[in-house]
Image (cartoon, rainbow, N blue to C red):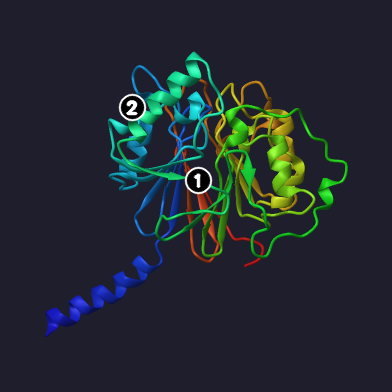
Amino acid sequence: MRTTITTLLVFLLYAPARAARTLDVYFIDVEGGQATLFVSPSGESMLVDTGWPDVGGRDADRIVSVAKLAGVKQIDYLVVTHYHMDHVGGVPQLAARIPIRTFVDHGPSVESGPEADQLFSAYLSVRDKAKHLLAKPGDMIPIRGINVQVLTAAGNEISKPLPGAGAPNPLCAGAKRKDVDPSENAQSVGMLITYDRFRMIDLGDLTWNKELGLACPDNKIGTVDVYLGTHHGLDLSGAPPLVQALHPLVAITDNGARKGGAPEAWQTIHSSPGLEDIWQLHYALEAGKVNNAPEAFIANLEEHCRGKWIRLSAEPDGQFTVTNSRNGKTKAYKPAAQ
């Protein structure tokens, strides 16, 4: 009887811990590309992009190393936001290191030419051996334990505001559009990731005019807790009517030492109402201290770095923590609505 009671007590203590599992998000340093690993409370995984191709497989190795740390043995969903070298180039090398079950993308590439054709062909050679989902605005990516809604894909965006959103956006007054972007950037798969009350947005490399389509004249998204800086913090993206209407508590930028982290885009984020902190994968060498976060919030300070990552862990009530793997810096956040 004693053994039975002890076993029951262990079960009762363990069950709440399982019920309270977090959504863990790892922002992996791929030197100015994107590789963001989501580990759902269900244990399923979603990787957004794979970084660059490299003779030594640097980015694939960094992704696999973080996946192992997170207890991930396969990528259940690989979302390829668009077909540029720093986002899709690492697919073949990654697939040789870890199983990828389902690929999600926006469909055919809009770019052509020797380099673009070769890049897309290399991706298809891997994708066509697995399951494939075509992303369309409004679709849900069926990862268990969290909600992942497609906001943009193939140059299109959601036609109606999300539940609770749709208010007129006063930031749109006088907003200027930029030249039409015919590249793959404007085709990016953009997503809203939610875990009960926690909300995070990742728009890939979506460019300025497409961002305005989500924000003007009405804010179709509402607010978020975490904003992943669009396009690595380049000033081709980061339209203030969208960024500041999102009202993020925290922003994270996957910039490189010499890519992204542009002063204009950084200041747009920094001046967003309600923002507490910006966390960066790299110190932006050409931006100066005034356009960089405090060093404690930056994962890699040197150009030639060891590829340190940033981790976010979110609770279902909306609270979350962010941790810098370089120095162990951790900060907890409680959304204002709580």
Vertical comparison of 325 with 140: above or below: above
Q: Nearer the viewer, residue 93 or 61?
A: 93
**Image location (x, y in percent) of residue 54:** 39, 19
Q: Is residue 26 left or right of residue 239?
A: left
Residue shown at 59% from the left, 35% from the top: 187
Q: Which residue is mark 2?
A: 93
| Residue found at the very far right of the displayed protein | 174
Q: Is residue 303 left or right of residue 69?
A: right
**Image location (x, y in percent) of residue 89:** 43, 25
- Give SS at disc 2: helix
**Image location (x, y in percent) of residue 318:** 55, 62
Crowding around mark 2 (Cα neighbors within 10 Å: few <14, some 14 to 19, many 20+) is many
Residue 73's image quarter?
A: top left
Crowding around mark 1 (Cα neighbors within 10 Å: few <14, some 14 to 19, many 20+) is many
| Residue found at the very far top of the displayed protein | 114
Residue 284's image quarter?
A: top right
| Residue found at the very far bottom of the displayed protein | 1
Q: Nearer the viewer, residue 149 or 109?
A: 109
**Image location (x, y in percent) of residue 294:** 62, 36
Residue shown at 87% from the left, 46% from the top: 173
The quarter of the rendered structure image containing the C terminus is: bottom right
Look at the image and tell me whether residue 16 can be seen. Answer: yes
Look at the image and tell me whether residue 243 can be seen. Answer: no
Q: Which residue is mark 1?
A: 135
Q: Give the amino acid at mark 1.
A: Ala
Residue shown at 83% from the left, 40% from the top: 175
Label 1 and label 2: CA atoms lie apart by: 23 Å
